[in-house]
Amino acid sequence: MIEFDEIPDLKTITDGEAEALCARLRSSVVDMVSRTGGHLASNLGVVELTVALHRVFDTGRDRLVFDVGHQCYIHKILTRRGSAMDTLRSFGGISGFPKPKESVHDAFIAGHASNSVSVALGMARARTLLGEDYHVIALIGDGALTGGLAYEGLSNAGLSREPLLVILNDNGMSITKNVGGVAQHLAHQRLKPQYLRFKKGYRKVMSVLPGGKTFYRVTHKVKTAVKETLLPCSMFEDMGFTYLGPVDGNDVRGLTRLLRYAKDISGPVLLHIRTVKGKGYPPAEQNPDAYHGVSKFCVQTGAPLHASGPSYSGAFGAALCELAEKDRRVCAITAAMRDGTGLKQFEAQFPERFFDVGISEGHAVAMAAGMAKQGCVPVFAVYSSFLQRGYDMLIHDVALLGLHVVFGVDRAGLVGEDGETHHGLFDVAYLSTVPGMNLYAPSSFAEVGTMLRHALQEVKGPVALRYPRGGEGSYHGDAGTTPSLITKEGQGVTLVTYGATYPDILAVAERLEEAGCQPEVIKLNRLCPLDLEPVCRSVAKTGRLLVAEEVMAMGSIGEKLCAGLAEAGVPLKAVRLCTTGRDFVPQGTVDQLRRLCGLDSESLYRAAMEVWKHE
């Protein structure tokens, strides 16, 4: 184990001390994450890489840009935040992702994938334009290379001639694989210390000798021709990068040496490393996907301390399997989130109709459009915050032709400890702008099945179901698919809500009745197009309105209802729109964040009382 406040000076430690430090860091991270939960396997895989990076670069000045960023725990410990790691992903604590507001060592926010090369190139270009001197490093995983944005960045970076280091952390996908004994031998020779020293010295001497630059260019072309005859051509070299690798990414000695060499190369460099995800902790090595993101667990056995219960994702996956049994046109699409979106059983039952496209949501939406155009009924299950990247395709590829694509919008609303980058607070606003879109919001597992069946069999054009992370609340009923309905009649105040907030509004209504108010509760099943008639009828009677929803204020259903009431000429004596507000919501448990935003039962009750008593 390591005391987090006893990190040595990494610029002066020996290779042996670095190896010992890696072992202690790995053990400490397993222990820490077992108590806090978080991303485990990905952090265990990059221990040596992170230590080597900090031996060679100064992240207080040099810019280290993570891709996704869930592998930043070692980086945070090495930048003197170890004493706060017990607060990891908790309300007011250390973020599970890089966060520039948290430390100067965190160069950029990193919660979604495939953007690191683009961001790093922007930083490199700013450095050149402003005449400054620092290094820029992008750390990207092979999973992020399934996203098209990564290739846009690589293509432009390779042509830029900007000094820039891209580190490709390959822990499961074979990229530019060298084949054959000669190829392997040459790859090994190219990375020997004496070869690297000779290459660096040779280039330096040739740059000062008369005619040396011309001679160097000629010999370099001959060497390249010979190499390409014996080695498969690297696409990264075709893009303009100096390619190094593939090398052992869990060898801190070799990585330190290579990083020092790459640091001095003028122009874009791509260092391809191969790491073991979950390295050093047997349960994570044997099942890295299961230990990618974990709750609190027992270190000795790897078993979670608290078993997860039924979830909306699971209810969605089960309902989809049932419907797919009866309709062979039904297909399922995921963007590298098979388990997270509840599609594991679908893949097992219908492997020929299951498609994992990797981290490429835009492609998934466009592919679904093509499938729908030719007669399939594609269902794309995706996290709300990730579907944001498919917005253009929603409009251009799906909506313009009115294609029947079904979207299972998972993790809608507050998601908890992953924080700002993962809360699903924008989907109601952006999906409502798509012409022809039908948007439903189930409030129970039963309603997931009912609404999904309706979406697949009865709705034409694009349709989405939005549902939260985790399990259902106290409501287990099924209100069907009527767009909006009055579930409790009254005359004191109109309470409108949908989805996961419905159980809380029912609890609020009970307390209001005890206080002498007779509330009227309206449950919205369909959010788009919005059915205003019951709301207009109710508010005309009560004169008072409270709308509760777990979304950003901008583009909320409450805003649309108020506009609709005004247009219909229905007067309002008092109104309260309860949302998550106009700012990004931090990390914390869902209960903590609901209290913060005023969306817990107690806060909603107080707000409803104020609306009711307002004169």
Image (tube, grey):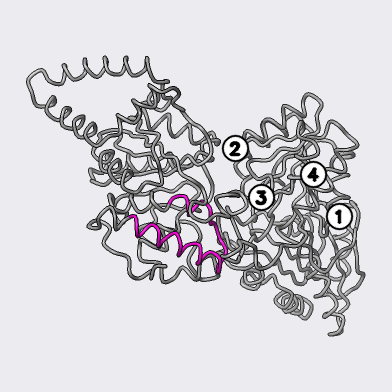
Q: CA distance from mark 3 to mark 4?
A: 16 Å
Disc 2 packing (10 Å; few <14; some 14–19; many ≥20): many
Image x and y of residue 242, in percent: 33, 30
Query: What separation in Å lies between label 1 and label 2 (alpha carbons)?
Result: 29 Å
The amino acid type of the residue labelled 2 equals Ser
Q: Secondary structure at mark 3?
A: helix
| First in residue order: circle 3 vs circle 4 | 3
- Residue receiving disc 3: 384
Residue type highlighted by circle 3: Ser
| Label 3 – label 1 distance at C-alpha | 19 Å
Q: Can you identify the residue that label 1 sits on?
A: 447
Question: Is the Cβ of the residue at disc 4 closer than 8 Å to that at disc 1?
Answer: no
Return the residue at label 2.
360
Q: Is residue 522 left or right of residue 295?
A: right
Q: Which mark is residue 438?
A: 4
Eyeballing the image, is 278 above or below 184? below
